[in-house]
Image: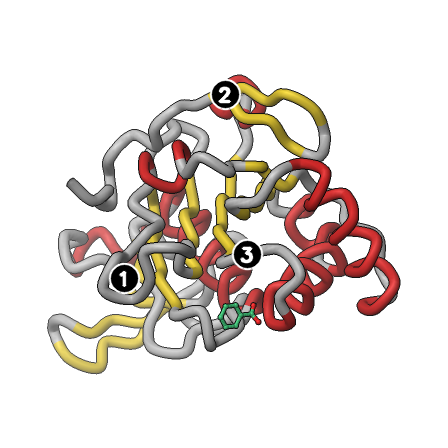
């Protein structure tokens, strides 16, 4: 069965380009992003791993650890990383899981046989400090991911985990947020002292509370 939001991200032990990793232990108290690639030495994946390496400081700022998976062996990964560093002008700075037997890919339902039974799709799992899955996104092999969007969603997840708010369409860090419907009008001034706009009884906006 596929993994759903709120499920505990399955634990595993993996061989990676940074040694053997026990996933939950490696995550510790951090947030995590686990994302899969169809195969080594493929063009879109090469650009994706380079893009994530360049965003490493953005993930660090948010206390997020990043790990990638590709269903090829470790020696292939090491050679491929040389190409990624060369062509994307960066240095891959996060672990890449070698999963030649598809064990972790199957555990995380990253193989979608009607798309391909030989390659994983481009799955993304964002995992909270409680080890629960907060977000899943699936892209086809032919479409590279937008990692700025993944950072944007992490900003929303981390904000809404701590405040009774939700983020509206196209929200980005610094924009107004929506007050959760469960908060009665009379509690708003105390809980959101920066002020609010009552557009409709169910649509109440307030400045981002953690700024
Ligand atoms: C790629 O990463 O470039 C790719 C992988 C599989 C199919 C199509 C593109």
Q: Residues within 10 Å of mark 2 (few under 14, many from 20)?
A: some
Residue at 34% x, 32% y: name it: 9
Please, what secondary structure does the residue beneath circle 2 have? strand
Rendering coords of residue 28 (x, y %): 54, 22
Whether residue 2 is visible to the viewer of this picture, yes or no, is yes
Labels 3 & 1 near each other (Cβ < 8 A): no
Q: Is 114 on the left or on the right of 83, as rendered?
A: left
Task: Name the disc covering residue 179, or none.
Answer: 1
Q: From the viewer's side, name the closer residue of 166 and 92.
A: 92
Labels 3 & 2 near each other (Cβ < 8 A): no
Whether residue 174 is visible to the viewer of this picture, yes or no, is no
Q: Which colour scheme appears in the figure?
A: secondary structure
Residue at 54% x, 47% y: name it: 70
The residue that label 2 is drawn on is 13
Mark 2 vs mark 1, foreground winner is 2
The residue that label 3 is drawn on is 39
Residue at 66% x, 61% y: name it: 41
């Amino acid at each position: 069965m596929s993994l759903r939001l709120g499920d505990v991200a399955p634990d595993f032990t993996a061989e990676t380009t940074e040694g053997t990793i026990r996933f939950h232990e490696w995550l510790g108290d951090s947030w995590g992003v686990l994302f899969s690639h169809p195969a080594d030495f493929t063009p879109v994946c090469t650009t994706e791993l380079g893009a994530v390496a360049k965003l490493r400081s953005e993930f660090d700022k948010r206390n997020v650890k990043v790990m990638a998976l590709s269903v090829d062996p470790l020696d292939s990964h090491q050679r491929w990383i040389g190409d990624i560093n060369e062509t994307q002008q960066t240095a891959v700075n996060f672990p890449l899981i070698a999963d030649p037997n598809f064990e972790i890919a199957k555990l995380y339902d990253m193989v979608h046989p009607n798309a391909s039974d030989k390659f994983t799709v481009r799955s993304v799992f964002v995992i909270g400090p409680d080890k629960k899955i907060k977000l899943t996104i699936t892209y086809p092999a032919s479409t590279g991911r937008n990692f700025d969007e993944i950072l944007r969603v992490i900003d929303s997840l981390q904000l809404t985990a701590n405040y009774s708010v939700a983020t509206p369409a196209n929200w980005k860090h610094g924009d107004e947020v929506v007050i959760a419907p469960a908060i009665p009008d009379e509690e708003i001034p105390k809980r959101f002292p920066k002020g609010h706009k009552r557009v409709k009884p169910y649509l109440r906006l307030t400045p981002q509370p953690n700024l």
